[in-house]
Image: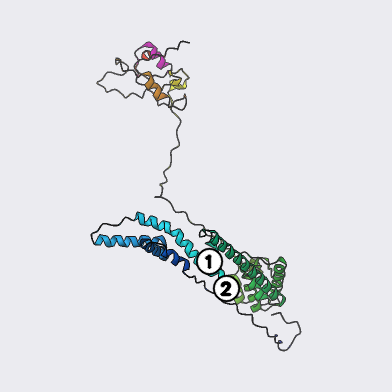
Amino acid sequence: RRPRPEGASGPRPERAPRPAPEPKPKPKRLVAARTNRDALLESLSEAERRIADQLMSGGINAVRQALDAQTRALAAEGKEPVDHAPILTLADDLSPKIAAAEWRDFAEAAIGSANEIALRDLRSVVAKAASSTRDDETRLLAAQLREALDARVEAMKANWVKELTGAIKEGRLVRALKISGQPPEPGSRFPEELANELASQASAALSEETMADRWQLVAEAVATSSVRRTVTPASPPKEVTEALKAAVAKIASRVPAIAASLGIAAPPAPGKPSAARKPSGPPRQNVAKKPPGPIKRPAEVAAGAPRVMIGGRAIPPPPRPHAAPANETPVEDAPVENAPVASAPEVLENVLGAPSDEVAVADVAASVPASSDEADAGVASGEAVVGGVSDEDDVVSPEPENV
């Protein structure tokens, strides 16, 4: 209702009666016959028919439940259970045939009343056509249903735009705002000129000349419309009541411009909640990891002395010797017996797995068993000793091949 002009006195003139809108027909419920399903059941054997009945009533889960109940009954009687594998295999083979027969029953019922049944029922039948069409006849039926769905959606869009245009021209602002927020198809849009006209009328209606109750009614209608983000009030009403503030506070997140005109802070729009990630295992303990220390090398190796090389690979030094007991001969004075010498293939097999010529070794004692002056000189100069070899002279270098 538009505000009265200044200086007007007397009762407000009565509006001309408007014809009531025609009631929309209630959509019919889609009820399908069982023609194709009954024909399929007649073509099956007695055992297959019993499985097909279970599939039609509850799918493959109904078959499994029936088998479990039969197994429990046989166990109570002391009999051997029946093997489930062949029955479940047969059920898997029958499922596509039953689904195709069921879809065809619903498709034949929908094609005869495509303009009368509920739109969601028609959509459901069209959506299942991709997995249920098996021959040219069913593909033709699916194409006809798809064309009927598209034609019905286009007709509903045209009727929606026509109804919205008539409400705007008649000055029925609240009704036009509500119609704009009820499209026949999610994501449907009406012409831009209609959107601009509707937004301008709503902005002009939210002014100081509008009564508080009318201001609240328009604001609530704007919150449900498709132009709510483009409506900016001309000014708040002269008298801002508590009821108006409470009503606008409820819709502040949808119409932040209207809430700001009344001094109400608009909360952020609710977003999609993110699913909290559940840990896949027990909680991990926060154990502080020690940083890897530097590779310890003997002072002799660090000095850059030559190493013992076999087959182009550096041989690691022997392990650290244990301290000899007090009643035994010290390591440096112990005589060296003829120890078994590792063969060259065995040494090469242990060495070839190393990633490079640089081999990480542990600290070596200052004194290493040796039986010759050359071995003692090699240890003193940083030369590595072959593990498991008592004397480096015992290692036979491979003879060069004759060319």
Query: Farthest residue toward the right?
Result: 7
Above or below residue 7? Residue 318 is above
Q: Disc 1 marks which amino acid?
A: Ala
Question: Residue visible at 34% across and 56% down?
Answer: 84
Q: Magenta residues?
A: 370-388
Residue 291 location (% of width, % of height): 45, 37
List the residue tagged with mark 2. 116
Q: Position of residue 229 (x, y in %)?
A: 66, 65
Residue found farthest to the bottom: 10
The CA span between labels 2 and 1 is 14 Å
202 w.r.t. 391: above or below:
below
Q: Nearer the N terminus, badge 2 or badge 1?
A: 1
Asked whether residue 120 appears in the rendered view, the answer is no
Q: Is residue 157 left or right of residue 333?
A: right
| Nearest the eye: 350 or 63 | 63
In the rendered view, does 169 fall on the left or right side of 66? right
Circle 2 crowding by C-alpha within 10 Å: few under 14, some 14–19, many from 20: some
